[in-house]
Amino acid sequence: MAGENYMDASKRRGASVLRCRVAREAAVLLYFGGERECRQAKLRAAEALRVRVLPTNLEVALELDKVAEENEGSARQERLINMREEALKIMKHLKAYHPVLIGSVWRGTIRRGSDIDISVYHDAPEEVVILLKKTNIAVSSAEWVTVTKSGKPEASFHIYALAPDGQKIEVVVRSADEANRKRKCEVFGDELTGLSVAELEKLLKENPTQKFIPC
């Protein structure tokens, strides 16, 4: 029995090591633009390493964060603070629509090419577009996007824009009745809470580079 337990533990350790290797390879593919989607990156990484083990999205995300840190160094932290400060300015303009900072700027896991992702809740998306334009935000395009989750279609209005300093912004407008709805993050597996205006203000004063990722 003891021998069987030892063999099982050894197999688990071996599988864990393989998952780490695939996760690292997938993260490198995502970071340097070899792939854009996490699942495809995992499949390609496993094929390159000639293994059949696939890591979780969380494992890949954590490795991607490490790769970004290794390649961008201290400048990454400075850029994170700048992006959070810019996000706060935009969110204050959108305060009537209950804005929430989400994505890598909320998480603290930005990398080259990351944009500022903000969710707002309002039943007239065109009003959000008009307000952004009035606040010196250059709106480049806007569109309805429908995705299927748990077998049900979900529609949201996506606004793509540039801040005055050139940073990319994506504002997602959801219906007002979705404001208190809990969402699960498909990458990290936890609740997609994000940061409100007040929470972001406090963060920038107390710990501007804090990360929000599962331990």
Image (tube, rainbow, N blue to C red):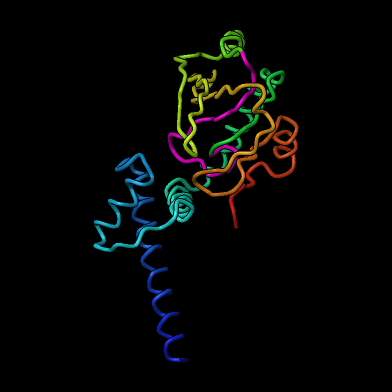
Q: Position of residue 12 (x, y in %)?
A: 42, 74
Residue sitting at the far bottom: 2
Residue appearing at x 60%, y 27% in the figure = 119
Residue appearing at x 59%, y 35% in the figure = 102
Question: Is 196 on the left-hand or right-hand side of 31?
Answer: right
Question: Is 19 on the left-hand or right-hand side of 74?
Answer: left
Q: Position of residue 94 (x, y in %)?
A: 66, 19
How many numbered discs, if any? Answer: 0
In terms of image quadrants, where is residue 33? Answer: top left
* Residue 99 in magenta stretch: no
Residue appearing at x 43%, y 53% in the figure = 60
* Magenta part of the chain: 104-123
Residue sitting at the far front: 151
Q: Position of residue 16 (x, y in %)?
A: 42, 68
Closest to the observer, 173 or 207:
173
Q: Position of residue 128 (x, y in %)?
A: 60, 14
**Quadrant location of the C terminus in the rendered image:** bottom right
Rendered position, 152 above or below 190: above
Residue 169 visible within the image:
no
* Residue 122 in magenta stretch: yes
